[in-house]
Structures are given as C-alpha cells and as structure tokens.
Image (spheres, grey):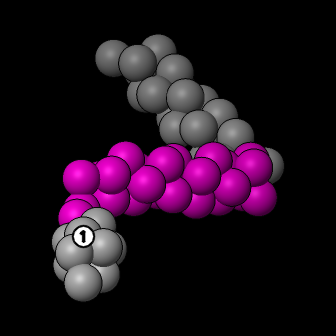
Amino acid sequence: MKKLKGFKEFLREEDGMGTVEIILIIVVLVGLVIIFKGRITAIVENLFDKITTQTDSV
C-alpha cells in the first residue's frame, strides 16, 4: 500500500515540468526558424535597406 501511495505522489510531482516545457518551446522556435529561414532573411534585409535609404536622405 505504501508503494502505491509513493507512486501516486511521484505522478503528481511537477518539479521537472518547467524544464521540459522550455526545451519544447526552444525546439519549436528552432524548427520555425529553419522552415522560414528564407523569409526571415528577406524581411531583415528589406528592413536594413529601408533604414539605409532613409538615413541617407536625412
């Protein structure tokens, strides 16, 4: 009976859940960056081009 109670307490324990959630979020973000790498690069280059042309006019 004591072993069953200890097992139930183990299942309710949530100490490691924060780490698992953070790792899953990082994996998803890295996956999205890999998938949309081309679009992200194009957007960043476009922004820097706009910044450069606007600072040249000032």
Query: Which percent across, then down, holds residue 41?
Result: 70, 40
* Residue position marked by numbered label 1 in the rendering: 6
Residue at the image point whose x is 37% and y is 47% from the top: 19
Q: Residue 18 in magenta? A: yes
Density class for disc 1 (Cα within 10 Å; few <14, some 14-19, many ≥20) is: few
Q: Is residue 10 left or right of residue 45?
A: left
Total numbered labels:
1
Query: Which percent across, then down, holds residue 45?
Result: 65, 34
Closer to us: 44 or 8:
8
Residue at the image point whose x is 39% and y is 58% from the top: 21
Residue at the image point whose x is 59% and y is 38% from the top: 44
Closer to us: 35 or 50:
35
Closer to us: 31 or 13:
13
Q: Residue 14 in magenta? A: yes
Could you tell me the amino acid type at mark 1? Gly
Query: Which percent across, then down, holds residue 47?
Result: 52, 38
Q: Is residue 10 left or right of residue 35?
A: left
Residue at the image point whose x is 46% and y is 28% from the top: 51
For the stretch drawn in magenta, what is the main secondary structure?
Answer: helix
* Extent of the magenta region: 11-37
- The answer to whether residue 29 shows anywhere in this view is no
- The answer to whether residue 44 shows anywhere in this view is yes
Q: Secondary structure at mark 1?
A: helix
In this rendering, the answer to whether 49 lies above or below 33 is above
Q: Is residue 44 left or right of residue 38?
A: left
Query: Which percent across, then down, holds residue 17?
Result: 32, 59
Where's the N terminus, which quadrant?
bottom left
Where's the C terminus, which quadrant?
top left
